Image (cartoon, rainbow, N blue to C red):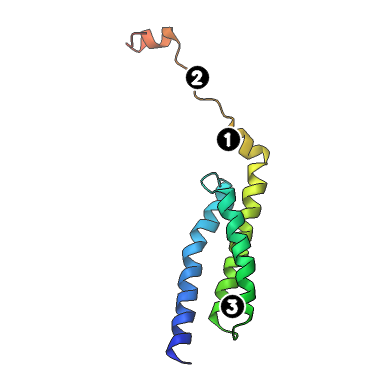
Amino acid sequence: MNVAVVAGAISTGLFAMSYLPMLVKAVRSKDLSSYSVGNLVITNLGNGLYTVYVLSMPFGPIWFLHTFYLVASALMLVWFVRYRSSPRAKGKAGASPASPVSPTHQRDAGVRP
């Protein structure tokens, strides 16, 4: 193997590892509210078009990296849509703030209303 292929293989592993915490957090928390649906859609469209370019290249590390990006970005979009419309997500978004402390409890705690 030449230096370029070794560098490509190592960087592929590093890039994939950098995405894993984001994917794990998204699937565990089901909270993707910090992501933009527009960004996720554009990322998936870009990855789809970039596939044409990657497939024209000789088989190598870029194929693995691009496949990982395709899967990761598609999962993020699917999870965004799925979790956004789930009852759990709606319950979190519509949760009411903590009830105010009654004046009686405030007086007992030494707080003036």
Report, in whole angstroms, how far the alpha carbon at label 1 lies from the one at label 3. Answer: 39 Å
Which of discs 2 and 3 lies nearer the camera? The answer is 3
Is disc 2 in contact with disc 3, using a CB cutoff of under 8 Å? no
Q: Residue, x 67% and y 41% (percent of image)?
A: 86
As drawn, which residue projects farthest toward the bottom?
1
42 over 17 or under it: above or below:
above
Report, in whole angstroms, how far the alpha carbon at label 2 lies from the one at label 3. Answer: 54 Å
**Kind of element beneath mark 3:** helix
The one of 28 and 81 positioned closer to us in this rendering: 81
Is disc 1 in contact with disc 2, using a CB cutoff of under 8 Å? no
50 over 9 or under it: above or below:
above
Q: x and y percent of residue 99 in the render? A: 50, 19
Q: Dividing the picture into quarters, in which one does residue 33 lie?
A: top right
Which of discs 1 and 3 lies nearer the camera? The answer is 3
Q: x and y percent of residue 54 in the render? A: 60, 77
Q: x and y percent of residue 112 in the render? A: 33, 8
- Classify mark 1: residues with Cα within 10 Å, few (<14), some (14-19) or many (20+): few
**Kind of element beneath mark 1:** helix
Q: x and y percent of residue 20 in the render? A: 51, 62
Tag count in the figure? 3
Lower sequence index among marks 1 and 2:
1
Residue on which the image places disc 1: 92
Q: Residue, x 59% and y 78% (percent of image)?
A: 63
Residue on which the image places disc 3: 63
> If the image is split into quadrants, where does the C terminus sit?
top left
Report, in whole angstroms, how far the alpha carbon at label 1 lies from the one at label 2. Answer: 16 Å
**Kind of element beneath mark 2:** loop
- Classify mark 2: residues with Cα within 10 Å, few (<14), some (14-19) or many (20+): few
Residue on which the image places disc 2: 99
Lower sequence index among marks 1 and 3:
3
Q: Residue, x 58% and y 72% (percent of image)?
A: 66
For badge 2, the amino acid type reads Ser
